[in-house]
Amino acid sequence: MARPMLPFKLSCSHCGWSKVAAPKSDALNAREVPICCPSCGNPHLNWSKPTFLESILLKLGSSALR
Ligand SMILES: [Zn+2]
């Protein structure tokens, strides 16, 4: 049984871009984990844990986006 990974938040200190993602399997989707900021190209993204509210929004959004 695949164990769901914890949601995470990526943010860019350069331009303020941020993204919250929750990988649904052990295999990370490259689309879900950008290696650099899609907005300004900054390769030094900050990883953090999403807040409680952000994880709720993520759950709502992930079903609406598909
Ligand atoms: Zn950026």
Image (spheres, helix red, strand yellow):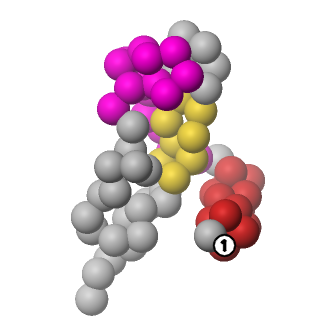
Q: Amino acid at mark 1?
A: Ser
Q: Is residue 1 above or below residue 65?
A: below
What secondary structure is found at the residue carrying circle 1?
Answer: helix
Can you tell which quarter of the image residue 61 is in? bottom right
Q: Is residue 5 above or below residue 39?
A: below
Residue 65 colored magenta?
no
Res 54 seen here: yes
Q: Is residue 13 above or below residue 5?
A: above
Q: Residue at x 43, y 50 (%)?
A: 32
Q: Position of residue 55 (x, y in %)?
A: 64, 58
Q: Is residue 37 above or below residue 30?
A: above
The residue stretch that appears in magenta: 35-50
Q: Position of residue 30 (x, y in %)?
A: 32, 49
Residue 41 colored magenta?
yes
Q: Position of residue 56 (x, y in %)?
A: 70, 62
Majority secondary structure of the magenta segment?
A: loop
Kindly give the residue lying farthest to the bottom in the view shown.
Answer: 1
Q: Position of residue 36 (x, y in %)?
A: 38, 26
The residue carrying pointer 1 sits among few (fewer than 14), some (14 to 19) or many (20 or more) residues within 10 Å by Cα, namely few
Q: Residue at x 51, y 52 (%)?
A: 21
Kindly give the residue lying farthest to the top in the view shown.
Answer: 14
Can you tell which quarter of the image residue 44 is in? top left
Q: Locate the C terminus by quadrant.
A: bottom right
Q: Locate the N terminus by quadrant.
A: bottom left
Q: Which residue is mark 1?
A: 63
Res 59 seen here: no
Q: Nearer the viewer, residue 24 or 4?
A: 24
